Amino acid sequence: MANNPFLSAYEFERRFHLPRLRLTIEKAEASYKTLEPETIDWCKCIIETACKTVLKEHDPGWADPGKTDIGPLMRDTLKAVDVPNAQIRSGITTIAQGVAEARNKDSLAGHGKMGDKPLIGNTEIQVFVTVCDSLMQIILAHLDKAPPDIRHTTMAFKELEELLGLEDCNRSAQ
């Protein structure tokens, strides 16, 4: 646990200024330090928040339906950021769905559990965190290629200006 596997999530939060996401990341980070089982619940929340944010930014007609399976959220997010290869989109979606299903089956908060069910192990927690980080990196990499619709974005002006390479243009206009 030498590196912080939540840096990509923090980068996403910084770009979009999402205080609720920051709190979720902090909770995930704190529970990961002691390998608490709820780490996987927080990771799933991070992924869902990122997907919903991207969909809101890249598809102004998209309306948050509330509770949505993570597989379809990821699939739609990857389409929204224009991941061109359908096979890669499908594979990434399958990984995200697998995380959600394992979370539902094995975590503390996933749909209530019988008191005698064994807790998820440290290795599984580390895998969840790694997958969360990888999914966040994939989303961020494709966001850089597919900038948001500036008419509908909640992205901070500075972030948008940097992303679109408008710093020099805006400085020369002053």
Image (cartoon, grey):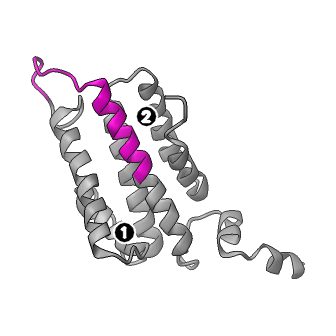
Residue matched to label 1: 78
In the rendering, at what x and y percent does residue 8 appear? Answer: 52, 49
Amino acid at circle 2: Ala
In the rendering, at what x and y percent does residue 52 appear? Answer: 38, 61
Compared to 9, does 40 lie above or below?
Answer: above
Mark 2, Cα crowd under 10 Å, few <14 / some 14-19 / many 20+, is many
**Residue drawn at (26%, 62%) of the image:** 91
Compared to 104, does 17 lie above or below?
Answer: below
The nearer-to-camera label among 1 and 2 is 1
Instruction: Provide the secondary structure element on which disc 1 rests.
Output: helix
Residue range highlighted in magenta? 113-134
The question of residue 28 being in magenta is answered with no
Query: Quarter of the image holding residue 69?
Result: bottom left
Query: Quarter of the image holding residue 59?
Result: bottom left
Q: Earlier in the sequence, mark 1 or mark 2?
A: 2
Residue matched to label 2: 28
Q: Is 105 left or right of 87, judged from the image as shown?
A: left
Judge whether residue 57 can be spotted in this image. Answer: yes
